[in-house]
Image (cartoon, rainbow, N blue to C red):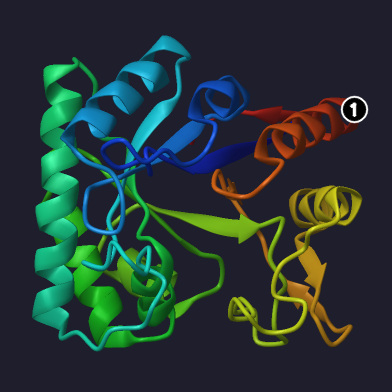
Amino acid sequence: MKTIDLNCDMGESFGAWKMGADAEVMPLVSSANIACGFHAGDGATIRTTIDLALEHGVAIGAHPGLPDLQGFGRRPMKISPQEMYDLVLYQAGALQAFARVAGAPLHHVKCHGALYNTAAGDEALSDAMARAVADLDGDVMLYALAGSTMAAVARRRGVRVVAEGFADRGYRDDGTLAPRGTPRAMIEDETRAVMQALAMVREGSVISITGQPVTVVPGTLCLHGDQPGAVAFARALRSAFATAGIEVEAP
């Protein structure tokens, strides 16, 4: 039986401001990427999201981002490799401390937004990210874009990498994600997104925004918890996977 991890970005509320339907989505996924306070989230949100993940047996991951609350961490920012290392270690270390108090290990790190996309094709930034993950206590994994420089560099560092695919994002011919705000960057049709997810898991490929086949072999698929209809989409994915004989579980 084929297996796939279904991850979701969570804990992205901040103070009295709420984002996402974490309580409804959590039972439908196998790993949670929890915001660490820089692009979203705060201490109380981290704590309650970890508790929710433990309640449903969901693996706990850190979701560090750029220090940009207003831009939700999605605006590019020029940073050095040392700044990358510091950003990842600082945020993931904080979330790891909350997880430890709750009696759970930190399972993985998955960077957010512009931090993720900037490092995906950059050797030096990817190496700094991998060093930070390696320096965390325990056998912490890195979720990295399938086929990316980030994934290759982290493997050379000896970090366990889980290749990530995106059901609701358009791919360019080189296997990178089409930037948000550009045509066909987001797949908003639920049926198309489910078909793309199934193609990645069963066939290891997707069709790019220009109509070309692109190799994408994921160990985990991302579900964006801040998207409208995230709960319905998660249910549709689980139903399609069950019908196809694909088991959902964390790596």
Identity of the residue drawn at 67% across and 84% down? 182
Which residue lies most toward the top here?
55
Q: Is residue 210 left or right of residue 41?
A: right
Image: 115 above or below 94: below
Q: Is residue 114 left or right of residue 201?
A: left
The residue labelled by disc 1 is 243
Q: Residue furthest front?
A: 16
Q: Residue 175: x percent and y percent?
A: 64, 79
- Quadrant showing the N terminus: top right
The residue sitting at 52% across, 42% down in the picture is 8
Q: Amino acid at mark 1?
A: Thr
Q: Residue at x 90, y 49 (%)?
A: 191
Quarter occupied by residue 49: top left
22 vs 213, nearest the viewer: 22
For image coordinates 77% across by 51% down, the residue present is 197
| Closer to the camera in the image, 72 or 99 | 72
Is the residue 149 above or below the residue 87 in the image? below
Q: Is residue 17 left or right of residue 3?
A: left
Question: Could you say whether the residue bearing mark 1 is in a helix, strand or loop?
Answer: helix
In the rendered image, residue 146, in percent from the top left (x then y), is placed at 56, 66
Circle 1: is it few (<14), some (14-19), or many (20+) Cα within 10 Å? few
Residue 94 picture location, percent across and down: 12, 42
Q: Which of the 4 image quarters holds residue 169?
A: bottom right
Please tell me in which quadrant of the rendered image residue 156 appears.
Answer: bottom left
- What is the count of numbered marks? 1
Q: Would you say 165 lies left or right of 238 here? A: left
